[in-house]
Image: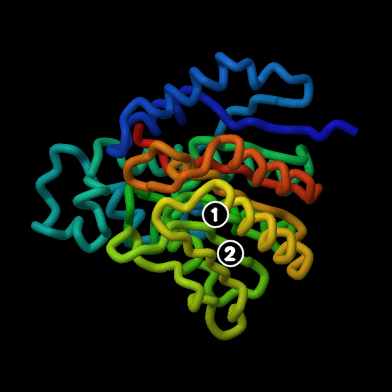
Amino acid sequence: MEKKVIYIYDSTLRDECDRLPTVPGRASIVTDLVNSYELLKSGNVTVVPSVPATYDELRLFHSSAYLDFMKAYKEDDVGFEDGEEDEFGLSYDCPLLPRLYTLVQALAGGSITAANLLAERKCDFAINWFGGWHHAQRDEAEGFCYVNDIVIAIQTLTRSFTKILYVDLDVHHGNGVQNAFELSPKILTLSFHKYSPGFYPGGGNVDEVGSRRGEYFSLNVPLRDGCSGKTYLRCFKEIFPRVFRAFKPSALVVQCGADCINGDPVGQINITTKDMGECIKDVLNCNVPTLFLGGGRLLI
């Protein structure tokens, strides 16, 4: 039987993503590519509009203090004390933006919408290419990520799935997701990423394995500068299937970071889109409900 796929999209979500300080306009470019290749015209793909996240949904991970600060912020507001935004990581790579809370609602809402559809068994696979913001922490923005839609989506999926395997293919370590589930034996995080001195976020070595009841439920595969597609695939094909068989997850969440693809000047990892496709094929062959998210934006 052909698998049912749901693709999350609406113009509001796209436009909000285009306001991010990473590379403006990338969300529109992705949309144009998807439409140009007619990827949504397959008979088993349904396009579903995203629903903005509610305050209570955002509270599944983020603190009230962090959310309330963003809600209260206005572009011309002078009511905040100097430096107060630094407490929430809202500076440097995550500057304060107009309508910041609206942006956060849109980013998280796409992944929550997808997770709800999976949890309700309305599809086999759900895709939100505008999601995948894996660095945000409970109380602060980090690494261009204002909200951790991944953690919230996983929390949403736990309504229906007892064990969830999170796979992070971004060139950067998925630190925000790992930190969120460090103590949980029901969420296993598996991250493939570049690991070298001075490379953000600095963590993700093999000795980070989780804590207490969650010990050995955080797994990291650190890679060197210039890692080839051959090496990347060998690591993935040896490690991912063994983790899947041992953990026996009832659902998967995959962050498909594009910045590990060759040509990215920051990532400097030499895998191709074909290599990434091979990884995704292995995930699809697991035949469990899966949420696919976007990730690191290719800077070329």
Circle 1: is it few (<14), some (14-19), or many (20+) Cα within 10 Å?
Answer: many
Compared with 227, 33 (above or below) is above
Q: Where is residue 93 in the image (x, y as percent from the top left)?
A: 25, 48
Q: Which residue: 56% across, 22% down? A: 34
Pointers 2 and 1 in contact (CB under 8 A)?
yes
SS at badge 2: strand
Q: In this view, does 241 lie to the left or right of 175?
A: right
Which numbered dot is residue 189?
2
Compared with 106, 206 (above or below) is below
Which numbered dot is residue 168?
1
**Residue 53 seen in this snapshot:** no
Circle 2: is it few (<14), some (14-19), or many (20+) Cα within 10 Å?
Answer: many
Give the amino acid at mark 1: Asp
Mark 1 or mark 2, which is nearer the start of the sequence?
1
Task: Find residue 27 and report its image quarter.
Answer: top left
Q: Where is residue 100 in the image (x, y as percent from the top left)?
A: 31, 41
Which numbered dot is residue 188?
none
SS at badge 1: strand
Residue lying farthest to the right in this orientation: 1
From mark 2 to mark 1, how far is it between C-alphas?
A: 8 Å
Compared with 3, 34 (above or below) is above
Task: Find residue 123 and report its image quarter.
Answer: top right
Q: Which residue: 41% across, 62% down? A: 195
Q: Which residue: 63% across, 66% down? A: 187
Task: Find residue 264 and report its image quarter.
Answer: top left
